[in-house]
Image (tube, coloured by chain):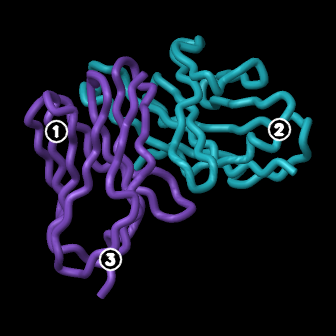
Amino acid sequence: EPEVTQTPSHQVTQMGQEVILRCVPISNHLYFYWYRQILGQKVEFLVSFYNNEISEKSEIFDDQFSVERPDGSNFTLKIRSTKLEDSAMYFCASRKPGLADPQGELFFGEGSRLTVL
Amino acid sequence: ELKVEQNPLFLSMQEGKNYTIYCNYSTTSDRLYWYRQDPGKSLESLFVLLSNGAVKQEGRLMASLDTKARLSTLHITAAVHDLSATYFCAAANSGYALNFGKGTSLLVTP
């Protein structure tokens, strides 16, 4: 069964360093998302991406964050200068176009755990 | 702002018993999602509910949606240990920026 894959599974970085988290969405999906989950807390929406543009973003997604689809398969989340509070599990998700899946099911990857020291 | 409240947040139940998890949301929502999360793992999609009165069942889990009451329920029938996990509901009022509840941590004991 196709799945969303994410790398790395765990990254430890120093405060102020840049981090890039990578995702390979399911191949026929056109909508891509990043969510995060701080340990023990609820899952929070960061950003949605379609047709090489951000379609929606939350207040969390400030100027320190950026997303990119550098080629036909990868979808990345970059944090320019990490802070302690960026420590979280970051989930990538994708979904089919609406006509192909009217329910709008989102498929999540296994997550990338980011630890900022 | 769309807010999602789940209760209970913690639930310990015996095998074989039935229980219901409740999910209230504050404003109109296009769709309601239920996910399961095992410790350290990703979110597994359980149900997507789109319309008032929608009911979906998969094994021992049944989800329903009442859009007028802005309430969704996840009913567990004859719980087994394998159902132990954290269950999240999430609502979206437009697009797919899901607003998640805090999750219900379910422990099923012998």
B76 sits left or right of A10 in the view: left
Q: Quick check: B93 above or below B49?
A: above
Q: Of the residues shown, which amino acid type is indicated by label 1?
A: Leu
User: What residue is shown at x 57% (from left), y 42% (from top)?
Assistant: A91
Chain A drawing hue: cyan
Provide the secondary structure element on which disc 2 rests.
Answer: loop
Q: Of the residues shown, which amino acid type is indicated by label 2?
A: Lys
Q: Of the residues shown, which amino acid type is indicated by label 3?
A: Val
Q: Can residue B45 be seen in this snapshot? A: no
Name the residue carrying label 1.
Answer: B65
Provide the secondary structure element on which disc 1 rests.
Answer: strand
Label 2 resides on the chain identified as: A
Name the residue carrying label 3.
Answer: B108
User: What residue is shown at x 39% (from left), y 64% (from top)?
Assistant: B10
Q: Quick check: do tags 2 and 1 share a chain?
A: no
Q: Can residue A109 be seen in this snapshot? A: yes
When asked about the image quadrant of residue B68, the answer is top left
Q: Quick check: A99 above or below B106?
A: above
Q: CA distance from mark 2 to mark 1?
A: 39 Å
Q: Quick check: do tags 3 and 2 share a chain?
A: no
Residue nearest the viewer, comparing B23 with A2: B23
